[in-house]
Image (cartoon, helix red, strand yellow):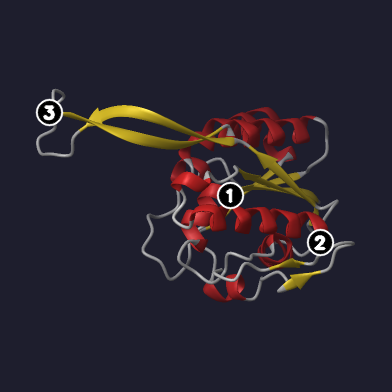
Amino acid sequence: MKTIIYIDGYNLFYGCLKHSQDKWLDLKSLFADKIVYEQNPHAEVTSIKFFTADIKAKVASNGQSAQLAQQSYHRALEQLYPTEIQIIKGFYSLEKARLLAFQQPPDKTQRVDVWRLEEKQTDVNIALEAYRDVAKARAEQVIFVSNDTDLSPALQALREDYGSDLTIGVVIPVRASSNHRPGNQQLSVFADWTRKHIRDEELSESHLPLQIATKKKPIKKPEYW
């Protein structure tokens, strides 16, 4: 069964990786070799599509170090898996916004100026890539690693248009040991199967090598990761 995996990098980071030692994550090892293989040993993962956006150093907790760490991580994935992992980027929008002040009850006359940081294009990119892959017969199974309700119309369209000819899987990117909100039923209702969490040991056993050789300088795991 030809299978393509679509990973929402923002969801994965905030659901599983932030404040952890697992940021140097091997996406193929975790999702193809462990999770998908456990679900269906006969599935053939032909592509992993990783949707993300470049960090803005001026608003990142670790500033320029965070930006450089992310760049190293992307280079590591591309070096190890040049034909298997595709990184598809949206962008972060940083804009001034005037929002309601936090108080009870809300008062629309009480507003404060804030910086609003939003990731743009990820949901649209995932939806378009998945629908095109299925339409062009590149996949018999599509797996979405996300807990984002904005993807539910895309899953619904795939289910309505392709029915039982297409297998849809959902992996909720939260840790089994966490207290995150439960998996989104709006995604699962259109799926043939749902993995409701990722186990801690699966993450810890799916790290990239500490150093990855290239034709020039090796790529190294960021020290603070």
Crowd tier of the residue under label 2, counting other residues whose Cα lies within 10 Å: few below 14, some 14–19, many 20 or above: some
Q: Which residue is mark 1?
A: 9
**Residue visible at 62% across and 67% down in the picture:** 222
- In depth, the one of 194 and 222 nearer the eye is 222
Looking at the image, the residue that sits furthest to the left is 105
Q: Quadrant of residue 76?
A: bottom right
Q: What kind of element bears circle 2?
A: helix
- Spatial CA distance of label 3 from label 2 is 53 Å
Q: Residues within 10 Å of mark 3 (few under 14, many from 20)?
A: few
Vertical arrangement, residue 83 with respect to residue 214, above or below: above
Horizontal side, residue 194 vs residue 212: left or right = left
| Amino acid carrying mark 2 in the image | Leu
Q: How many numbered marks are there? A: 3
Give the mark nearer the N terminus: 2 vs 1.
1
Residue 138 relative to residue 7: left or right: right
Question: What amino acid type should be assigned to the residue bearing mark 3?
Answer: Asp
Please tell me in which quadrant of the rendered image residue 221 appears. bottom right
In the rendered image, the quadrant that contains the C terminus is bottom right
Pointer 1 local density, CA inside 10 Å: few below 14, some 14–19, many at least 20: many
Distance from Cα at disc 3 to Cα at disc 1: 35 Å
For mark 3, what is the residue?
A: 107
Contact, mark 3 vs mark 1 (Cβ under 8 Å): no
Tell which circle, 3 or 1, labels the residue nearer the N-terminal end: 1
Residue drawn at the location 78% of the way across and 54% of the way down: 78
Q: Where residue 132 sits in the image (x, y, percent)?
A: 75, 30
Q: Is residue 42 left or right of residue 102?
A: right
Disc 3 on helix, strand or loop?
Answer: loop
Q: Which residue is mark 2?
A: 80
Which percent across, then down, holds residue 143? 66, 48
Compared to residue 216, the image places residue 122 above or below, namely: above
